[in-house]
Amino acid sequence: MRALVVDDEPPALSELSYLLERDGRFERVRPVASGADALRVLDDGEVDVVFSDISMPGLDGMELARVVARSERPPLVVFVTAHEEHAVDAFAVQAVDYVMKPVSPARLAQAVDRVVGALAQRTATDPAQDPERSTGTTGEPADERIAVELGGVTRFVRRSTVRYVQAQGDYVRLFTGSASHLLRVPLTTLETRWAEAGFVRIHRSTLVNLAHVGQVRQGQGRLALRLLPDGPELPVARRHARAVRERVLAAAADA
């Protein structure tokens, strides 16, 4: 992979470039100190991913992401910043990840893993590639069928239709687009079993299916997720906010 690193602070630029070079998965790591310099590099040659700070003089990281998004084959974008308040905007420009400073090697490795996955998916959806892979039929968890009872009749609900889940004592309630169903299973069990299918804990009593998230809202220090279509707005507990932001960004990049 070929990476471009953008940061106006020399120590941060040097550290991030060093960590990426040490990762071993990059053919080239090019550091630049401004958004304008980044555009010149992007005009001169191919770049697979841009690791960019957000708060920079002149062309900031968010504006840079919007410019490169208009390219015919835009590079992926990972934001590396000291400020949490830009996470919602990062979701809007479909950044692959949002890494907080100071950056640890382990956290950066996770971001690179997501870049590798996003590039692989981009290749898989290329019409020139294998048609079976382009349909997304490989490597995805099967859509589980869940038996639920309603009026003495056992019905089956597809997991993909479940928008969110809430704990109710020893039970959980599954909310689909048109109904809700009570199921005797601990919420923690579903959290573990359905994690690979895109369900994430946003509150001690709530799991949400990221495939049904339409908007991310932030105000007065609180994060909330609005579900599609015209669904409820679900509050995110403070202790889960950072993890939820990261998962939402990853889901948006994979979409």
Image (cartoon, rainbow, N blue to C red):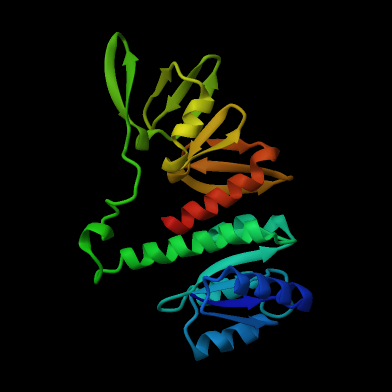
Return the x and y of residue 128 as percentages of the image width and height.
24, 72
Q: Residue at x 54, y 63 (%)?
A: 112
Q: Is residue 68 above or below residue 210?
A: below
Residue at 56% over, 87% down: 41
Residue 90 shows in this picture = no
- The residue drawn where x is 44% and y is 33% is 193
Determine if residue 33 is in view: yes
Query: Left of 213 or right of it: where is 38?
Result: right
Q: Nearer the viewer, residue 160 or 101?
A: 101
Q: Position of residue 188 (x, y in %)?
A: 53, 27
Q: Residue at (68%, 82%) from the top-left corner?
A: 34
Query: Is 156 left or right of 219, judged from the image as shown?
Result: left
Q: Check the image and name the residue furthest to the top.
A: 152
Locate residue 221, reporting x and y percent.
73, 45
The correct choice, above or below, for 246 with respect to 28 in the image is above
**In the image, is residue 222 above or below residue 156?**
below
User: Which residue of the protein is positioned furthest toward the bottom in this rendering?
Assistant: 44
Placement of 180 over or under 33, stated as above or below = above
- Residue 50 sits in quarter: bottom right
Residue 49, position in %: x, y? 52, 72
Quadrant into which the C terminus falls: bottom left
